Image (cartoon, coloured by chain):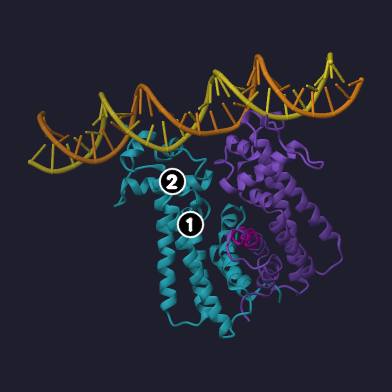
Chain colours: A purple, B cyan, C yellow, D orange
Amino acid sequence: MARIQTDKDVSRKEVILKAAASLFREKGYKAASMRDLAVKVGVEAASLYNHIRSKAELLHDICFNVASQFVEHMTAVETSDENPIMKLETLLRFHIQQMIENFEEVHVTDREWRFLAEPYLSNYQNQRRSYRRRFAAIIEEGINRGEINKIDASTAVLIILHAISGIESWHRSKQKISGAELEENMLTILIEGIKK
Amino acid sequence: MARIQTDKDVSRKEVILKAAASLFREKGYKAASMRDLAVKVGVEAASLYNHIRSKAELLHDICFNVASQFVEHMTAVETSDENPIMKLETLLRFHIQQMIENFEEVHVTDREWRFLAEPYLSNYQNQRRSYRRRFAAIIEEGINRGEINKIDASTAVLIILHAISGIESWHRSKQKISGAELEENMLTILIEGIKK
DNA sequence: ATTGTATGCTAATGATTGTTATTTTTGCGG
DNA sequence: CCGCAAAAATAACAATCATTAGCATACAAT
């Protein structure tokens, strides 16, 4: 009889969550079936339900785990006494590193959150909106202090967040530069701009 | 009996394609059903098949129509005798305008192309790769001429294309700046950078 | 060794999917 | 008004979906 492997102190649910993140990234939430997931975990589909409540719960857990990490980091940045440009750089580096190291979960959260069921969908959207506002506030503070170009802060946030989600393409590319190089290049382009 | 409206000289298939682009954007290709599409068109699901071959064909048509527009524009830019920075700006403006005016189709192409069936999937991926290489070549030319910062061109392309796809958020936002303002802000941020 | 609990399997459920064959209706040119 | 082709409707299909019930097995603690 097949059994879900649990080395260390990871629960069987966590094993399933990890596999789900990988599967949802590969095929998308809607296109991914519980039978696909079962194959990935090495067990029959019905057996999964001993550990999880539903497919929707998997997406929910992935999205909210990721979201809470970013919110937590944002709070840390806000309460630091760096100047806005440094705060921005810290935020950027965190986003980039998360996108590199915690790729599957972050990417799934980025792309598949819209399939969350209510009331979690509204909850997530509120968190997201709030996060972006706090992000924009840091940029606006930088504009007020004359450290940052006079731009629409919301547009800047939009560009930054989506640019970072583009790291997905980097993951898929064959001959890729190192993660460190990617990070430095992204920071240069977004902060210093393309034109010399 | 319901009938598909065809004002002007648009075929019934084109009406269906437009509705499909809208539906695929709203719900995603996989989550969108032919019955959903039928409702949107105002007809029974089976009736759609008098005009189209399959659901896959709809996605295929949307993606390849969009792709060919971008490829065509790229060729025009390449053969112009502007300097690299101007070429880049022209490309950016075209992308932004397409994302604003032809939103549904472009967005669907961006997000749902992976559900294309072979051999179209490989074909599309090749087109995409080629397009990005040509985009990167323009940036590299700018670096060689000393007009552009020494950055990894592939990373720059990645950032630019994904930043522009972020216009999707602008469409969904309630209090949005005008399209023209958005365009100027995006150009400033991407070309001049955030830092003053 | 025995018992209790956690885990897995088989089989089946009703719902929804894309698509088809067939029939009915529509609108247009004569 | 008639006949013909295009378009739509009805009804059905096999496949796939997430999920459940009931039973079997493995494992840990006694």
Q: Which residue is mark 2?
A: B20
Where is B161 relative to D26, above or below? below
Residue A118 shows in this picture: no
The residue carrying pointer 2 sits among few (fewer than 14), some (14 to 19) or many (20 or more) residues within 10 Å by Cα, namely many
- x, y (%) of residue B103? 49, 56
Q: Residue at x 61, y 48 (%)?
A: A25
Q: Is residue B88 magenta?
A: no
Q: Amino acid at mark 2?
A: Ala
Residue A177 shows in this picture: yes
Left or right: residue A99 versus residue B71 is: right
Where is A139 relative to B173, above or below? below
Q: Residue at x 34, y 43 (%)?
A: B52
Q: Amino acid at mark 1?
A: Val
Near-viewer residue (A9 or A80): A9
Disc ID at residue B106? 1
Q: Residue at x 86, y 60 (%)?
A: A79
- x, y (%) of residue C9? 63, 26
Please give the chain letter of the residue carrying mark 1. B
Tell me, yes or no, whether the two marked residues, 1 and 2, touch with CB atoms within 8 Å.
no
Near-viewer residue (A88 or B114): B114
**Quadrant showing the N terminus of chain A:** top right
Q: Residue at x 75, y 66 (%)?
A: A88
Image: magenta residue range: A162-170
Residue sticking out furthest to the bottom: B145
